Image (spheres, coloured by chain):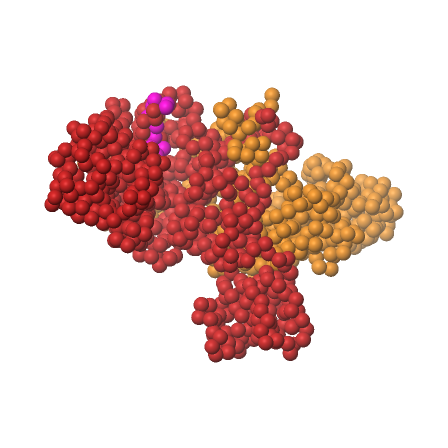
Chain colours: A red, B orange
């Protein structure tokens, strides 16, 4: 039997009158006026196959086929009768008159219809093989492939080399929890699956490869959220001899080129660059969604002496903050909507949600409707209106607490309102793609529980040149040459210029309270490498799963991964993980705890 | 500081007179006539930098630099003085007169010279970061990258889609030993790292993706040989609706295209195809090195009644074999060389190595020199000479034992002699690239220890259509639609047409003595998938490490892997595996055995 000649979904007018051989699946079968119509499906789409009773043997076969049978069809392309064209299909103007029909494989009745859009995730993941037949899933995974190839093409053009780094690596517990792999040959010892190829790519720079990339799996054994998987895919890049701005330009151009090439979207010619401190100040977030046209107004200085204790207490805390979020036209929000927002911010630790509706600016205090107005003096009220730029018909929400709580709660509220129908109807949400860089992250965050500084990114991030001294004198003031690429409120990539000097790296380890012995045990190979003329270098890693999810407009990264895990870290299709033989455990020198 | 303008190794005459900025490492520094010459190295090669004492500050810096310092050089390209050109370098006709010299990073004295070719592997792997600076290692890893990209381009052109399959999979102990990953969330359960994405790629075919590929890491926890690593990289491919021959043609063309594109080698326009049985018969190996112009001669039938018990006993065994290996002009081999070969074949289980030197064919028995001639009757001797086609001056070696021992021992001897200087000098070895397909492997091999049939490839391989009945009646006679691609005696790829019918798959499981419950527990998801109109499909997996090793002419696959493991499965650079915290083990619900 000769090879198929065409994909079903690509049979079109240019093949009119020609013999074709197709292979595919029965998407739908219907009998109509003594003729059997089969919509035959393959990865490229559908084509209508007509089985006429005047070829008796073939027709008999056609009578036996059911949904999801795998068929081969040999026939001739002809025009569909006038009025029966389907403009939604590439093959919509033609049909294939079947001469020969071969059942390549029968199918039992599928547990669900492929076009059923209301399946539970459990059903979809258990029957993933069928779920992946759905046109949307086929599209998502092909988009994923095109994105990866566009990335490769761009990086290849720029002189980057894909170099594979190990999957069986050393466990260096810093940051997330490692997946461990017991060693059989070296009893009592373990490999770790990489959380990222960070140190290997830095060592490749020290080795002089100059420009490295890899599209590779990384692993974190953390409790899963909607956009997390135990294994995820990183576009991991590193380059030598470039300054921070040059690195950002290079990868900004990559993302622009990938979006254009794969989904025809033109992103901003220059991405805005925003300091971390400004992002937190204006949006309470280091990954602001700039589609939302709402911003914080700083009020901490204004509220130090007001009677309303919630405000004045927060304003007088060392790490307190009082901020406002003005929502234009928000006075139309109902009391129950406002109460709903109050419950929402509680999730982020806010103890309440104060608000003021601006009914009539000109009327001063009397024009402001709010339970809290009576406890705010005139100067404060005037300043609120002036600074927020509020107009009549607006509502102003307030956050007052420790800085982190205010940023989290009011930042979440900003998104909640910004993504609502209200915002879309009132010009407060601008659809489209809003990328930006967030830069100048702090080197360290203070960990109250451990009473020590921990790295905001990772301990290999370079401090800004002018902040080197702060490593020893005031770690909290030290800013890093770190940058995140943010798109519509998602962090899609993050990177930094790395430390390339051994003395600076040692200082950072000391600031992290990693003593010299421990530093050497964990990272001796890095410290050694830095001593041999390590070049200035830096890079970035993008989350492929997230980027494709956004591009596909999918609900979850699980919709752009062929065989994802559930939130319980299980593969419902193959039933992994699973118990193993005692013999296997014995060979690995481990036993189960009871 | 502006970006570098050129790679060192690419500075050539076209830049004559121009200002350049370079970044790289001090490969060599020498003082000559009051001038300092620095060979500056980057990934593209070397360029000579001239530091003249008339720029005092720069010269002072130059005096301080040592090998492997990382430098930036700003200067002007000029011609080298006549007679000092170096034709071995792209930059060999020019040099860079240094105007400004910046030490980007100093280096302590390296533990070895980069051009030292006599380093132990332990030294190289411990100091891998420096080892990777060696031009040969840079070349190897870039070749590896170019091979991978050529593969991707070819497969992309052919409509293949790269789809990522999971790294955290289900343990199904069949074949090699799994690497296990304890689950934290699901106490007492384990993931396995994939030995290959075999079942996932088959399921992708069932899902209708039609053509899949992936360049991906696979894992086998086996004791390591020279060409094995715990993690290795497979070019993994699968396609639907093609027959065996079509699949082979597709991937033969891929390998041809990759060889041409990356190393400019034109492989045979059509690879020879040889049945497994013929390969074993003629070469004692399923991966014969066809560069070696030596073949076995079958003598089992001739030796059944000779006095020489070694031969007649073997010839009368059910699984015995007597075979000859004629070595043209081999009569010149010395007694000690022959004795050496005798010791060599003992490694493969041979109990001795009989031989006959053909001094004078015309003289019959008297023209044959050998300790065994007296125990062979005239008819046997005549047949030996006739069948081997021996000429005066040849030597004939013999193997007589169980078939497996003869094939292994005489097959190894064929290679040993075939790769020797003697063979090269006597036209018995033809340098170049000799690819072939070995096909029609047996479905099963009999495992004496377990007293059952086991799969030669894997249990998902399709039997030949005409051998389906043998699955139940005579598994040993059943041949598979399996094929290996062999190049110069290395298996570089292997694949098969897969079983796409659930009933056939169940029969194979039964032939393997996997009862229905066990089959369902281990492979239920596959059996289910096959029921939903699984398409005919098949594929292949190539070993990227091996292919690149051969192309690079490297001694070991460790020379084409950036960070390989030792034979003890250790990473000497990062010291993995290593002990981990008790806390980590507790979270994973395991403890160490004492």
Q: Is residue B225 above or below residue A19?
A: above
Horizontal arrangement in the rendering, residue A463 relative to residue B193 (left or right): left
Q: Is residue A300 magenta?
A: no
Percent from the top left, x then y, of residue A75?
58, 73
Q: Is residue A451 magenta?
A: yes
State which quadrant residue B111 falls in.
Answer: top left
Of A180 and A36, nearer the camera is A36
Residue name at image x 73 percent, y 37 percent: B349
Q: Main secondary structure of the magenta part?
A: loop
Q: Is residue B371 above or below residue A14?
A: above
Q: Which residues are magenta?
A: A449-458
Q: Is residue A432 above or below residue B194?
A: below
State which quadrant residue B182 falls in.
Answer: top right
Residue name at image x 55 percent, y 63 percent: A27
User: Is residue A213 at least partly visible in the picture?
Assistant: no
Horizontal arrangement in the rendering, residue B553 relative to residue A63 (left or right): left
User: Is residue B494 at least partly visible in the picture?
Assistant: yes
Please give the count of numbered marks on the rendered protein.
0
Percent from the top left, x then y, of residue A184?
59, 30
Percent from the top left, x then y, of residue B464?
70, 57
Residue name at image x 17 percent, y 42 percent: A368
Residue name at image x 82 percent, y 43 percent: B314
Of B346 and A387, nearer the camera is A387
| The C terminus of chain A - image quarter | top right
Horizontal arrangement in the rendering, residue B394 relative to residue B215 (left or right): right
Percent from the top left, x then y, of residue B289?
63, 49
Of B487 and A299, nearer the camera is A299
Horizontal arrangement in the rendering, residue B415 relative to residue B205 (left or right): right
| The N terminus of chain A - image quarter | bottom right
Of A522 and B79, nearer the camera is A522
């Amino acid at each position: 039997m000769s090879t198929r000649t065409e994909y079903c979904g690509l049979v079109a007018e240019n093949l009119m009158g020609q013999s074709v051989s197709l292979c595919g699946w029965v998407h739908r079968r219907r009998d109509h006026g003594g003729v059997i119509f089969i919509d035959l499906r393959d990865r490229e789409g559908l084509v209508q196959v007509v089985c006429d009773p005047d070829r008796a043997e073939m027709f008999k076969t056609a009578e036996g086929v059911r949904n999801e049978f795998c068929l081969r069809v040999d026939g001739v392309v002809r025009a569909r009768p006038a009025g029966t064209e389907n403009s939604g299909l590439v093959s919509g103007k033609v049909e294939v008159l079947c001469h020969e029909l071969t059942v390549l494989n029968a199918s039992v009745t599928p547990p669900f219809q492929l076009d059923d859009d209301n399946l539970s995730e459990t059903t979809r993941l258990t029957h993933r093989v069928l779920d992946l037949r759905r046109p949307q899933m086929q599209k998502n995974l092909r988009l994923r492939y095109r994105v990866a190839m566009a990335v490769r093409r761009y990086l290849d053009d720029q002189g980057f080399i894909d170099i594979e780094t190990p999957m069986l690596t050393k466990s260096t517990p810093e940051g997330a929890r490692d997946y461990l792999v017991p060693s059989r040959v070296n009893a009592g010892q373990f490999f770790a699956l990489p959380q990222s190829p960070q140190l290997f790519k830095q060592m490749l720079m020290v080795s002089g490869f100059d420009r490295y990339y890899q599209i590779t799996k990384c692993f974190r054994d953390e409790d899963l959220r909607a956009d997390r998987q135990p294994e995820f895919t990183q576009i991991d890049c590193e380059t030598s001899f470039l300054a921070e701005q040059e690195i950002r330009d290079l990868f900004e151009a990559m993302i622009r080129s990938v979006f254009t090439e794969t989904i025809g979207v033109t992103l901003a010619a220059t991405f805005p660059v925003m300091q971390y401190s400004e992002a937190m100040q204006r949006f309470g977030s280091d990954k602001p969604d700039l589609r939302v046209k709402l911003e914080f107004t700083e009020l901490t200085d204004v509220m130090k002496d007001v009677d309303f204790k919630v405000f004045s207490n927060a304003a007088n805390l060392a790490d307190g903050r009082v901020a406002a979020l003005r929502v234009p036209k928000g006075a139309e929000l109902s009391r129950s909507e406002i109460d709903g927002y109050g419950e929402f911010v509680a999730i982020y630790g806010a103890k309440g949600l104060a608000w003021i509706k601006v009914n009539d600016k000109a009327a001063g205090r009397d024009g402001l409707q709010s339970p809290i107005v009576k406890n705010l003096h005139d100067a404060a009220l005037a300043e609120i209106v002036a600074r927020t730029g509020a107009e009549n018909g607006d509502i102003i929400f307030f956050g007052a607490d420790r800085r982190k709580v205010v940023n989290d709660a009011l930042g979440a509220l900003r998104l909640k309102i910004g993504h609502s129908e209200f915002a879309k109807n009132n010009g407060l949400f601008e659809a489209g793609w809003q990328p930006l860089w967030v830069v100048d992250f702090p080197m360290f965050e203070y960990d109250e529980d451990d009473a020590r500084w921990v790295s905001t990114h990772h301990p290999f991030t370079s401090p800004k040149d002018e902040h080197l001294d702060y490593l020893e004198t005031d770690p909290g003031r030290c800013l890093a040459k770190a940058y995140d690429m943010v798109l519509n409120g998602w962090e899609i990539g993050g990177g930094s210029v790395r430390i390339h000097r051994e003395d600076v790296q040692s200082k950072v380890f000391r600031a992290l309270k990693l003593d010299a012995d421990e530093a050497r045990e964990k990272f001796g190979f890095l410290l050694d490498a830095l001593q041999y003329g390590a070049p200035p270098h830096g890079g970035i890693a993008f989350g492929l799963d997230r980027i494709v999810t956004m591009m596909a407009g999918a609900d979850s990264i699980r919709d752009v991964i062929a065989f994802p895990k559930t939130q319980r870290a299980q593969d419902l299709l193959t039933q992994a993980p699973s118990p193993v033989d005692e013999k296997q455990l014995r060979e690995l020198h481990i036993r189960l705890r009871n």
